[in-house]
Amino acid sequence: MDVSTDGVPHIGQTPARSASDAVAEPTAAISECDYPAPLLPEDEWNRQLAAHVRPRDWVNPRPKDRYHLVVIGGGTAGLVSAAIAATLGARVALVEKSLLGGDCLNAGCVPSKALLTTARAIRMARRFPQLGLKTPTDIRVDFARVMERMRRLRAAISPHDSAARFRDLGVDVFIGAGRFIGPDRVQVEDATLRFRKAIIATGTRPAVPPLPGLQDVHYLTNETVFSLTALPRRLAVIGAGPIGCEMAQAFANFGSEVLLIEAMHGVLPREDREAGGIVQRALEHDGVRVLCCGKSLHLEKTGGGARLRVESHGRCCDQIVDALLVCAGRAPNVRGLGLEAAGVAYDEKRGVHVDDFLRTTNRRIYAAGDVCSPYKFTHAADFMARIAVRNALFRGRSQFSRLVIPWCTYTAPELAHVGLTAAAAESRGIAVDVLTQPLDEVDRAVLEEATDGFVKVVVRRGTDRILGATIVAEDAGNMIGELTMALQHGVGLKALAEVIHPYPTIAEAIRKLGDRYNRTRLTPFAKRLLRWILGRA
């Protein structure tokens, strides 16, 4: 059976997005409540986190007669929906069965980027001799302190998503499992919430592929990997999408022997192939062993972890690992919501069905975020929530399809993208030109010795109209915003050539692309004409 991957979508595609701790089992849960794994181990930072996003002493309020808006799900889309609606004066109820803040705060963007900061520091420290700095012969990683730092920073961010904050905004916060019991009401514990409109924002969970033997081994997902307290000596990561690549590179820099397995060709297989190749070389440079085109993956339990066998490019790999991390996509949280009772259409793969206005098959109910979107990103959920609230409460006609959504994989170097790739454009019958600015022609990249990357822009054939862009660079996530704005507002490469960037910066590559486009307009005839004009001067 082929190995699945967590992927990122291009416009018009449906994505597959996004090992147990055989080394050190998480300690006991914080309380008798059924807290999920992100709140393990028990320490002061996880107690602070719990106090904000799942308070032990929380008492659900008495329901109002009827709410303008009931929001099910307290992740990014749900929190944004509730905050906007309450700020505008609506009566709002927010229902969350687990942890406020959702995947992003507790088991996604926040903890992962905290780890990546440390991993990048290790990567830079290894370059010190190259920079003329004397360092110890080896870099020792205190993994327990790395993870403690992550938990401390996660707890510091959590007040923004806390139950108390939303109560103070005027939102009735209900902790418990919510389910529809009719087209206009939701039940939470023993309370019934009647509504005029509702938004489903229940997000996704890790998808577990039907791999032979997986059910017999102890494995990690993004919901449990951040509970580790000891570094696995040997780690296998299944799925070379964004989550898999980020974690594989981080753990390799921490000192694990990492094996990264992907069913498709290369890492980040849904991205620009040239860009994915650069990221793969970086992973391999950091010690990750990449097995792409993986077939016939089989797992079995061993005394200290798991044994895996997989075929890659005709060669068989038989490896014993201490921990296994499954990054094989996301599954929408639609079970147990009573969607049938509400008349809301859904399926287990795509999640809740919505139209371009984010309205479900029940005209009272909308959906936002990962539970209904091909774009499994926090920033996409945020802007979808704004659309859903506007359309639900004010009869707005905002359209999801009009959003221009960039994304970034935070490996080193980063890979950021917006719009169409050349392959996606051509599959739609759109003739395109592709302009690429290599970083080895950008002075700041040369000075940083970070020249393995580029800025690539796809334009409509014969014009400067931007259809998409891909950046591979150390700070690609911050750079993609300029091209996203250009794409959203119809700013072409000619205009970007006139934007002055401070010298020296990596972002100069974008201006250089504009210059590169302008040079394409200097045809042989134009050159002869200019020489004739100058010759007469």
Image (cartoon, rainbow, N blue to C red):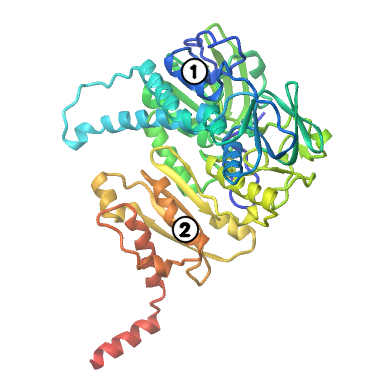
- For label 1, the SS is helix
Quick check: 417 left or right of 72? left
- Tell me the kind of residue under disc 1: Ser
Task: Indicate whether 48 appears above or below 123.
Answer: above
Task: Indicate whether 269 appears above or below 320.
Answer: below
Viewer-proximal residue among 286 and 58? 58
Q: Which residue is mark 1?
A: 227
Residue 345 seen in this snapshot: yes
From mark 2 to mark 1, how far is it between C-alphas?
38 Å
Count residues near mark 2 (Cα–Cα under 10 Å), then give few for <14, some for 14-19, many for 20+. few
Viewer-proximal residue among 303 and 495? 495
Circles 2 and 1: CB atoms closer than 8 Å = no
- Residue at far bottom of view: 536
Task: Indicate whether 380 appears above or below 46.
Answer: below
Q: Which residue is mark 2?
A: 485
Disc with the residue nearer the chain's start (2 vs 1): 1
Residue 255 seen in this snapshot: no
Quick check: 313 left or right of 61? left
* Residue name at image x 74 percent, y 38 percent: 195
- For label 2, the SS is helix
Viewer-proximal residue among 71 and 357? 71
Res. 251 image quadrant: top left
Tell me where residue 264 appears, x and y as whole percent.
58, 38
**Picture quarter with the C terminus:** bottom left
- Tell me the kind of residue under disc 2: Met
